[in-house]
Image (tube, rainbow, N blue to C red):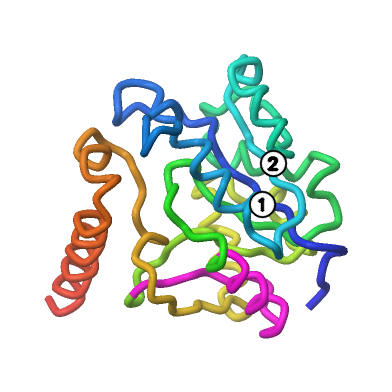
Amino acid sequence: MGTGVGHPTAVILAAGGSTRMGHDKLLLDLGGMPMLQRTVASFTKASKVGDVLVVLGPQQKPAWQWLQSLKVHLVENSNPSKGMISSIRTALGSAWVEGKDFLLCPADVPFVQPDLVDQLVVAFRTRGADILLPTYKSLGGHPGVYAAKLQREFFLHGDANGAKEILVRHRATTTRLAVFDPDVCFDIDTEADARIAMDAGARWARVEAEVEARNQSQRL
């Protein structure tokens, strides 16, 4: 494995249109702070992460400029309509990611603990994987950790199915790490998700329901 220099950069993908929510979910109040700030904290408080880079939509930087006081870098995706792959490419084109391993996490996965982020980085470095993905009861979660040498792959592939194309191409060198925290699988897409977000038991029950639904579909 070609390990990138220094600690990996965390890339938070925050340029989506919040279409299922109906309003800007980055501003969703979660325990007295906007969702994006809570997601950012998962990485700024992790000791094994270097730079933290947030990819915003067009004209969004002014509203979030204050995040730079938390040692967070901001870039804008000029055309997020091209999908999440366009935000990933925007991040990978920045000086904060070049030559470094990197983590990818959507902004709507706000409850991953910093110590778990550190655990993922350590496992990535020690297991010799090109990609490491956390799983909860075999359900895929976030953030994923990627080797620096894969950065070019995201520019060559992904136009049809986004990052899934890169995952398929590197299935043989991907490690799926089982973790005990269901929050790696909890994302906030709808108002119903937002209503239960600050109730850990309800969040985890939703994830358990997703696990059971997946298991039932596999048994059919």
Say left or right for 166 vs 107.
Answer: right
Location of residue 88 in the rendering, given as x and y in whole percent from the top left corner: 64, 43
| Picture quarter with the C terminus | bottom left
Which residue position holds label 2?
53
Location of residue 103 in the rendering, given as x and y in whole percent from the top left corner: 64, 57
Say left or right for 76 vs 190.
Answer: right
Q: Secondary structure under badge 1?
A: strand
Residues tagged 2 and 1 counted as in contact (Cβ below 8 A): yes
Q: Secondary structure under badge 2?
A: strand
Is the residue 178 above or below the residue 95 in the image? below
| 171 part of magenta stretch | no
Which residue position holds label 1?
10
Crowding at dot 2, Cα within 10 Å, few <14 / some 14-19 / many 20+, comes out as: many
The residues colored magenta run 117-136
| 127 part of magenta stretch | yes
Along the line of sight, the residue nearer the viewer: 77 or 137: 137
Say which amino acid is labelled 1. Answer: Ala
Say left or right for 220 vs 129.
Answer: left
Residue at image point 29% right, 31% down: 20
Residue at image point 79% right, 40% down: 93
| Comes first in the chain, label 2 or label 1 | 1
Say which amino acid is labelled 2. Answer: Leu
